[in-house]
């Protein structure tokens, strides 16, 4: 079956997912509806992770789905859905800026082709990565490198992220005085005796 | 009997052309896993109504078939023949696709679940990560359904649900990191094998807080009572699926129950020793029990014990629904962020210390190799 089209099984899978990736990436910047654009971005991440799986980088692939598809894009969608973006003012002056944009795009493509051309990144420059045996664990390989050779950069990156989280909260958090808010800890601590009084009384005569 | 079916099946696959053989083998395995799952989902809906009925001193459905046993089929046929109404100005493609996006992850995650020694569709290295990643996709179905319905109630339900699921996924992931530390592997099969021995070897004991956090987060992840604010029928009608009818609604329903079974199976595998029998490792007692003629296998480890454990967790799901009032939204958030995440972080440290100190009977096998 594979011989008919001159491609091996992994190649077919690669072309399917890479064309999905390119098409969905194009759709992200062309569709008008921001929610649809975000959903196409999800599809792009998903296709990229499938391509990483082909590289036997299962940890990175699954983490891409877990972190970007499962968490980041959910929050992104959350925000985009609540915004009522009016696209008309955003598209004003499209034709006016088109020549400038095109010129910049052509320059960028030219520069990239200089660096990323076949003389530097051609197929013959790099041998195909050797296939690993069945007991190879990408997770274990990444873990052992991350916690030996790169342990300080890794820890520093973690601390920087923590600082960023705290800074973001500290900058945006403002305590408004005089508002009435519920205090869940008090509500949780309430016992039945505080709220309910059981009264024993005789039945009244009719 | 089992061997006979296996040989017939292998012979049948050998008849196919070479290229199709692996596909046929995989697809037949998928069918073998999914058909019982769908049937379980169907009867879980009946079990829910019956059990909650008995808990509330009612009888529950008893009209269709003997003791109401055919009720799920009646429900299915009713929903199949109902009209699917697509709301005006809704996004049709996403509206129809949303139930499928919810349902697909709920069944795709079963690919790595080991049912017995060496019995899994795919025994991959990063099985635990795969399950986490796949189940995290399910929330898109809810969000898309809420948004594509073009309805305020559905949108509110989707917002509530996505915030809730994102919050509880962190606690759930941390709880599973504890299992990962304890077993020293991401492979589901090895996680179960690390709990071999007696009941005392199950991870539910050393990781008891994580076990509790995992299961409660699982209830929240599946949007089940008491965390079902996404549906919240007293405030927002039926939440994200208020505009759905007929089979589209049925698929949401199926996904919810398939997710319940999945969470139960994962809890059984991670914390209650998967397919291992609770009677194993008792020395003479278990040896005599296992050697009993005809019924000995029922006491020994095997698929049926995983089934019983799943059934136990499912009963808990139904029990919660029958007993607890719905959480208020801010209390859900407080529980997730301020209670569960600190508990998991503290217990991860404790688990790490326990593994380093090689505390028997769980961590003295050299798990970190």
Image (spheres, rainbow, N blue to C red):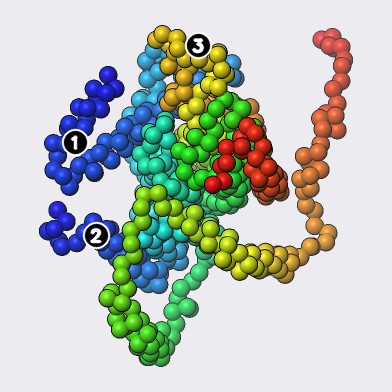
The quadrant in which the N terminus of chain B is found is: top left
Residue designated by label 2:
A12
Is A202 situated left or right of B193 in this image?
Answer: right
Q: In the rendered image, which residue does mark 3 sit on?
A: B288
Q: Is residue B251 visible?
A: no
Location of residue B318 in the rendering, given as x and y in whole percent from the top left corner? 55, 28
The Cα–Cα distance between marks 3 and 2, rounded to whole angstroms, is: 56 Å
The residue pinned by badge 1 equals: B13
Badge 2: chain ID: A
Instruction: Find out whether the residues at labels 3 and 2 contact each other: C-beta distance under 8 Å.
Output: no
Disc 2: CA contacts within 10 A as few (<14), some (14-19) or many (>=20) = some
| The one of B112 and B101 positioned closer to us in this rendering | B112
The number of numbered discs placed on residues in the rendered structure image is 3
The answer to whether residue B163 is seen in the rendering is yes
- Are dots 3 and 1 on a single chain? yes
Left or right: B293, with B158 as reference point: left
Could you tell me which secondary element the residue under label 2 belongs to?
helix
Residue occupying image coordinates x 35% and y 87%:
A114
Protein chain holding label 3? B
- Which residue is more in the foreground, B152 or B55? B55
Mark 3 surroundings within 10 Å by alpha-carbon count, few (fewer than 14), some (14 through 19), many (20 or more): few
In which quarter of the view is residue B231 placed?
Answer: top right
Q: At 63% across and 32% down in the image, what residue appears? A: B361
Q: Could you tell me which chain the residue with mark 1 belongs to?
A: B
């Amino acid at each position: 079956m594979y011989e008919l089209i001159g491609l091996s099984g992994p190649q077919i899978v690669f072309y399917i997912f890479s064309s999905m990736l390119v098409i969905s990436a194009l759709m992200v910047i062309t569709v008008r509806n921001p929610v649809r654009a975000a959903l196409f971005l999800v599809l792009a991440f998903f296709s990229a992770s499938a391509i990483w799986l082909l590289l036997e980088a299962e940890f990175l692939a699954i983490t891409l789905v877990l972190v970007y598809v499962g968490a980041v894009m959910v929050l992104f969608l959350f925000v985009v859905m609540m915004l009522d973006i009016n696209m008309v003012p955003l598209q004003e002056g499209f034709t006016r800026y088109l020549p400038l944009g095109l010129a910049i795009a052509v320059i960028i493509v030219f520069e990239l082709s200089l660096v990323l051309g076949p003389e530097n990144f051609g197929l013959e420059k790099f041998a195909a990565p050797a296939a690993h045996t069945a007991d190879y664990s990408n997770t274990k390989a990444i873990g052992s490198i991350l916690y030996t050779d790169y342990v300080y950069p890794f820890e520093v990156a973690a601390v920087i992220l923590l600082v960023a989280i705290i800074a973001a909260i500290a900058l945006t958090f403002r305590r408004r005085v005089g508002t009435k808010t519920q205090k869940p800890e008090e509500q949780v601590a309430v016992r039945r005796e505080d709220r309910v009084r059981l009264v024993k009384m005789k039945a009244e005569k009719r | 009997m089992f061997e006979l079916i296996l040989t017939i099946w292998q012979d049948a696959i050998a008849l196919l052309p070479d290229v199709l053989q692996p596909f046929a083998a995989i697809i037949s395995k998928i069918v073998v896993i999914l058909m019982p799952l769908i049937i379980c989902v169907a009867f879980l809906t009946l079990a829910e109504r019956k059990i909650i009925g008995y808990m509330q001193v009612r009888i529950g459905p008893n009209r269709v078939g003997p003791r109401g046993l055919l009720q799920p089929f009646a429900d299915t046929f009713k929903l199949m023949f109902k009209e699917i109404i697509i709301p005006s100005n809704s996004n049709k493609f996403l509206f129809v696709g949303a139930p499928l996006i919810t349902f697909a992850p709920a069944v795709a995650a079963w690919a790595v679940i080991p049912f017995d020694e060496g019995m899994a569709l795919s025994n991959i290295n990063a099985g635990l990560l795969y399950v986490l990643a796949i189940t995290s996709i399910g929330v898109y179905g809810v969000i898309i359904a809420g948004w594509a319905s073009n309805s305020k109630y559905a949108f509110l339900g989707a917002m509530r649900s996505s915030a809730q699921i994102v919050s509880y996924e962190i606690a759930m992931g941390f709880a599973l990191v504890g299992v990962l530390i304890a077993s020293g592997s991401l492979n589901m099969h090895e996680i179960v094998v690390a709990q071999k021995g007696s009941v005392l070897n199950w991870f539910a004991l050393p990781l008891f807080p994580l076990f509790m956090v995992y299961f409660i987060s699982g209830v929240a992840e599946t949007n089940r009572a008491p965390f079902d604010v996404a549906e919240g029928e007293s405030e927002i009608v039926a939440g994200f699926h208020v505009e759905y009818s007929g089979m589209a609604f049925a698929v949401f329903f199926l996904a919810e129950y398939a997710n319940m079974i999945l969470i139960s199976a994962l809890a059984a595998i991670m914390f209650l020793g998967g397919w291992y029998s609770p009677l194993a490792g008792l020395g003479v007692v278990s040896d005599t029990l296992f050697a009993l003629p005809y019924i000995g296998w029922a006491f020994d480890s095997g698929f049926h014990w995983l089934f019983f454990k799943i059934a136990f967790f499912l009963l808990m799901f139904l029990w919660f629904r029958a007993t607890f009032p719905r959480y208020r939204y801010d209390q859900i958030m407080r529980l997730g962020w301020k209670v569960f995440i600190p508990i998991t972080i503290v217990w991860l440290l404790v688990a790490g210390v326990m593994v380093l100190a090689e505390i028997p009977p769980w961590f003295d096998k050299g798990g970190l190799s």
